[in-house]
Amino acid sequence: MNNQFIHDNFLLENKYAEELYHEYSKNQPIIDYHNHLPPQEILEDSVYNNLTKVWINGDHYKWRAMRTLGVKEEFITGHASDKEKFMQWAKTVPYAMRNPLYHWTHLELARYFDIYDILNEKSADKIYQQTSEMLSGSNFSCRNLLRKANVEFVCTTEDPTDTLVHHQALAKSDFEIKVSTAFRPDKAMLIEADSFFSYLKELGEAANLDINSFTALKEALKNRIEFFNKNGCKLCDHGLNQMPFENYTEAEVNIIFNKKLKAETLLPQEILKFKTAILMFLCETYHEYGWVQQFHLGPLRNNNKRMHSLLGPDTGWDSIGDYSQAESLSAFLNTLDSKDKLCKTILYNLNPADNEVMATMIGNFNDGSIKGKVQWGSGWWFLDQKDGMTKQLNTLSNMSLISCFIGMLTDSRSFLSFPRHEYFRRILCNLIGDEIKRGELPKEEMQWIGKIVADISYFNAKEYFNF
């Protein structure tokens, strides 16, 4: 119904956009190839008793908005009741207009609960009670939430020390949605961190090795890559401020590692050499196993040290960084390519100033061997909103082939986040539909344009990841 806020043609501004979305995009399954969902909850088919547990807990997007409005931390991450936290979120929603949270909130209420009311303080109690009753039933269990969203594949993210016990059990289960993981070895690179050796102890225990040298560290990481690979993992992921690159020799890196063992202060260049060496080793190993590698570049993390010390990481104290990206990224990818060891690669930038850098960088290493071998990933984190997605789609179209793009992912910790794929698809279809209306694309080629939309929505990712 078009008199509702969320209706069939939400964000679709003309008949061409409507046709592209409803005929070619809407019903495509979802391949969510990067998220932070807890696999244990999928395995156990968890049931969430209320919206706070599945919708607000862990969602630092919502937390930042609530803090901005002046909501006290007690009602965000503190000891307030679930209903009190929900009521504070409902109070915040009307103030979130023009933030993507406003759209996502109402899409998620509509798609999972068939609720089309606007969420605010007046409607909050009714919506909380209605959704709590629904969530308490088995039809709204974790797995059924994935089914409701038409999910075909989800890829979580785990540290190399993870036992993958939940993934192993899922692989043996009768759950029809495929669940895999991505290898995330960021902690193994942080030689400057006070926690570096305590982490290496954990890694060594997982690999059954004593990590007392750079060589042993590489051996342990390869051991874990092999273990992940045997358990169906075909992707890795790295969260980096910027791609490290500094020329090094093996002898230099051994000396740097030994300096760390002796608790000696490392110079910035030594830290950079170590990070380059370990990441280069990892990427060459990914190539050996035929993985897809992902690099998330550009965040400035944990800015509020006081709150970080109280709540820990990933609680809403991160922002966009303004690091230089192009030169070191080019050098790193070029070094791998010169060895013929550059595997499929996805680059994500957090600073929109780097859009054109990324759109043109991928063209340097798309060598014709694989369709879309090096990808510029979809708008990420602070950029996964209407303006950010539109800019990413336009820049990719202008400087590469959007027809080869592998589309959207959630990067989320919530099982209610999958309507973000719908959001992306509607934005994509409206963008292209508007150009057809203006005569910039031929309406006579609607079937072909529809194929491109379907490919971006689903088929390109399915082919790229060999699902």
Image: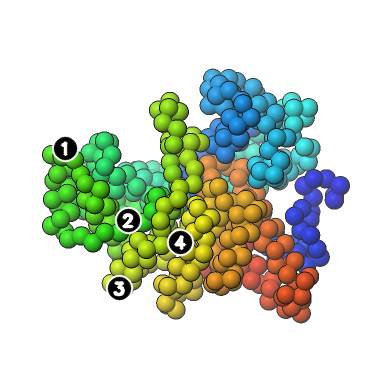
Q: Which residue is mark 3?
A: 338
**Residue 176, position as x, y percentages in the image:** 55, 53
* Disc 3 to disc 1: CB gap under 8 Å: no
Amino acid type, residue under disc 3 in the picture: Ser
Q: Is residue 79 left or right of residue 18?
A: left
Where disc 4 sits, the SS reads strand
Q: Which residue is mark 1?
A: 263
The label on residue 346 is 4
Q: Which residue is mark 2?
A: 244
Q: Can you tell which quarter of the image residue 75 is in? A: top right
* Disc 1 to disc 2: CB gap under 8 Å: no
Mark with earlier residue (1, 2): 2
Mark with earlier residue (4, 2): 2
Where disc 2 sits, the SS reads loop
**Residue 222, position as x, y percentages in the image:** 26, 55
Amino acid type, residue under disc 1 in the picture: Ala
Amino acid type, residue under disc 2 in the picture: Pro
Where disc 1 sits, the SS reads loop
